[in-house]
Amino acid sequence: MIDDDMSHQPLAATARRIADALRYDILAGTLAPGTRIRQEDLSAHFGASRIPVREALKALQSEGLLRLKANTGAWVASMNQAECLEIYKIRERIEPLALSESIRLMPESALDILENLAHRVEQAKSIENFILLDREFHLRSYAHSSLPELNAMIVRYWNTTQQYRRAYMHKVGFNRRPIVDSEHRLLVDAIRRRDDYNAERLLQVHIRRTRLEFEKNGLSMID
């Protein structure tokens, strides 16, 4: 799968430990959008100096998970509805490209993993499990692309919208699951046939449908 840690410079052990813990809490929804992150609290909790704390915060900012403001602090990234929908429009364009590039280099073993993940998504009994598996399914489908900058951009967009996908699933529930499952099966079939043309178009429709559902249901975003 595409590595969620997209920082170009490797973090020192303490900074990585802090970044990993914060990333987990943000993506799991434990830290909601707009939550303030205090450096002194992190230093005390992890028994670390301010230097690794600042390094961790900067790394998470580069991943789209935090927003840092000079002289004021760090906040879990948040966005309004217009910003979220804009990101989905961008994803409709760039993720099909990443998929097409990945299909050409994807080994057979990766195809088996994708098919298994699609099945596990169908069997998911909770929203949290569904969100986790759906994310893994899509990011793994792009993992063999030879365009690292594009893949880093995609992970950043998945990070910044994860909280809103969770809110959408809680509002709409699993009512759309049969559609999602069928689209995943069609994607796996196209990928297995190395049919990058139709895989691109299927994925674009898949992402666009979610965006239109966001608009239709008037999902409340955090400003």
Image (spheres, rainbow, N blue to C red):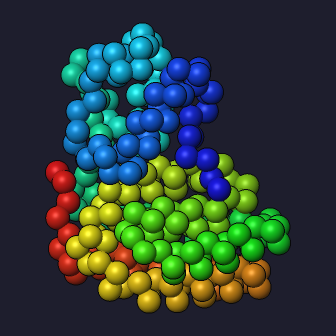
Name the residue nearer the viewer: 83 or 112: 112
- Quadrant of the rendered image containing residue 43: top left
Instruction: Single out the residue that lies furthest toward the top.
Output: 49
> Is 172 displayed left or right of 131 in the figure?
left
Q: Is residue 119 visible?
A: yes
Quadrant in which the N terminus is drawn? bottom right
Name the residue nearer the viewer: 89 or 103: 103
**Residue 6: x percent and y percent?**
57, 40
Q: In this view, does 122 lie above or below 150?
A: below
**Residue 129: x percent and y percent?**
45, 65
Query: Could you tell me which residue is drawn at 50 percent across and 84 percent down?
Result: 181
Query: Could you tell me which residue is drawn at 36 percent across and 85 percent down?
Result: 176
> Is 210 displayed left or right of 216 in the figure?
right
Query: Could you tell me which residue is drawn at 23 percent across and 39 percent down?
Result: 35
> Is 131 displayed left or right of 119 in the figure?
left
> Is 112 displayed left or right of 80 in the figure?
right
**Residue 34: x percent and y percent?**
22, 42
